[in-house]
Image (tube, grey):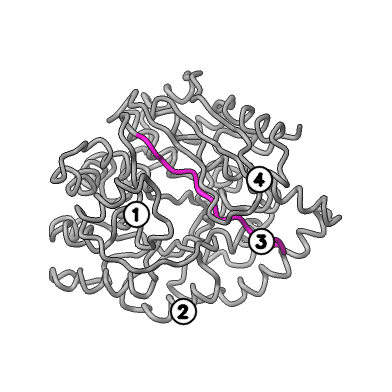
Amino acid sequence: MEPIITSFLDMDDYKFLMGQFIHYHYPRVPVEFALTNRSKIPLARYIDIVELKEQVDHMLGLRPSVRELSYLEQVWCGDKKMYSADDLIFLATNTERPDREIVRVGDDFRIRFFGPWEITTFPETKTLAIISELNTRALMKQQGITEAELFRIGEQKLLPKLDLIKDKPGLFVSDFCHRRRALKSWHSHLLDIMIDRIPNQLWGTSDTYFAMAKGIRSTATNAHELASAYAAMAGDDDKKLRQSPIKLLDDWWNFYGYELSIALTDTFGSRAYFQDMLSERLKRGKGFRQDSMEPIEFGELAIQTLKNFGIDPRDKMIVFSDGLTVEMILKIYYHFQGRIKMSFGWGTNLGNDVGFTPISMVIKLIMAMDRPAVKLSDNIAKAIGLKSEIERYMTVFDYSENRNEKCVY
């Protein structure tokens, strides 16, 4: 077996930020994560379950190297180091692994991870990268395509996109393709191309390993996992449930401060989130991440909300990150240019546009503290959770979104 994940750092950077936050606030909370294959692509027809298990088990056994720990120790957040000595010691010395289940169910896989939250948070994005690469390898073998040929196809698609982005003031893209990439080797290659072709537009990468290896900025905010867990831990108290995203926002602010104060608004609906933030939180934060509402609609909602509280939107930022193509990036850029700061987290269409149909799949939190977890999002097609809990959350958060758009990415 040729390992796909060879570094503990080869995952989305926000996992380190959230991992430290979880280790500090909620050690030993029992959680469970599970795979959802939104594409309904019959993965088990293409991917050998034995190799999948071997790849995942190899990944679970990785620990940070001395070089990697030294890199993390030198990452700064504003005027202080990002990671505490206590957290780095935990990463270096912990040998506990989460439990995992990987079984074939028809033409698909059931994949679950369960255990203490501070260690069970880490396999998510790396497992998705493994599945995506194994699928690509199988399709390459089936169609007789070599890695060199895949690179050639990828470059033919990538270079015109970069030409459209190049030299546009205020248009910054970040590589968000780690979990969605076709191949790790292609991911590395495309980053080299971007560093060469659009150095002024490349904001950074969400992959911590490549940030270290290529000497570029690591970019991250946080993910739905935290909000889903906070909500689950609110129990049956509907008032605590409604306030749980704001409690998380405050806890995150108190822990990381301004530099990481990009609010992910859509876990239970962005409209309720904006309504509950109130002026002091809107004023202090750096901005927002759009993830499931139609992007122009989201941007207009964010700008109007800021204006309603007398806040100049030009002082804030939106990180757009939902299924972006270069055409959509340009549409958003021209629409909001000069009205609000923007950054674009470019994922599947960047890292998996190589001639195959990419998989829309996620691994999401489904249990926390023995309570079912929920994610609604602004696109109800992305909702995850028990039907009864989804209905309860819709009522508590005055959920009224009617977007039900197929998840392509």
Which numbered disc flags the more N-terminal residue, 3 or 1? 3
Earlier along the polypeptide chain: callout 1 or callout 4? 4
Which of the two discs, 2 and 3, labels the residue nearer the N terminus? 2
Where's the N terminus, which quadrant? top right
Magenta highlight range: 353-367
- Residue visible at 60% across and 62% down in the picture: 350
- In terms of secondary structure, where does tag 4 sit? loop
Q: CA distance from mark 2 to mark 3?
A: 24 Å
Residue type (three-letter) at the residue carrying disc 2: Lys
- Pair 4/2: label in front: 4
| Circle 1 residues within 10 Å: few <14, some 14–19, many ≥20 | many
Q: Which residue is mark 3?
A: 357
Name the residue located 46 percent from the left edge and 71 percent from the top edge. 171
Indicate the amino acid at tag 3: Thr
* Sequence-first disc among 1 and 2: 2
- Foreground tag (2 vs 3): 3
Quarter of the rendering containing residue 63: top right
Residue bearing the label numbered 4: 107
Q: Amino acid at mark 1?
A: Leu
Left or right of 260 on screen, residue 172: right
Tell me the distance, in whole angstroms, between the alpha carbons under discs 3 and 1.
Answer: 26 Å
User: The residue tagged with tag 2: helix, strand or loop?
Assistant: helix
The amino acid on which the numbered mark 4 sits, given as a three-letter code, is Asp
Q: Residues under labels 4 and 2: Cα distance?
A: 38 Å
Would you call the spot at circle 3 few (<14 residues within 10 Å), some (14-19), or many (20 or more)? some
Q: Read off the residue under disc 1.
A: 376
| The quadrant where residue 134 appears | top right
Secondary-structure class at tag 1: loop
Q: Residue 22 — which label? A: none
Q: Residues within 10 Å of mark 2 (few under 14, many from 20)?
A: few
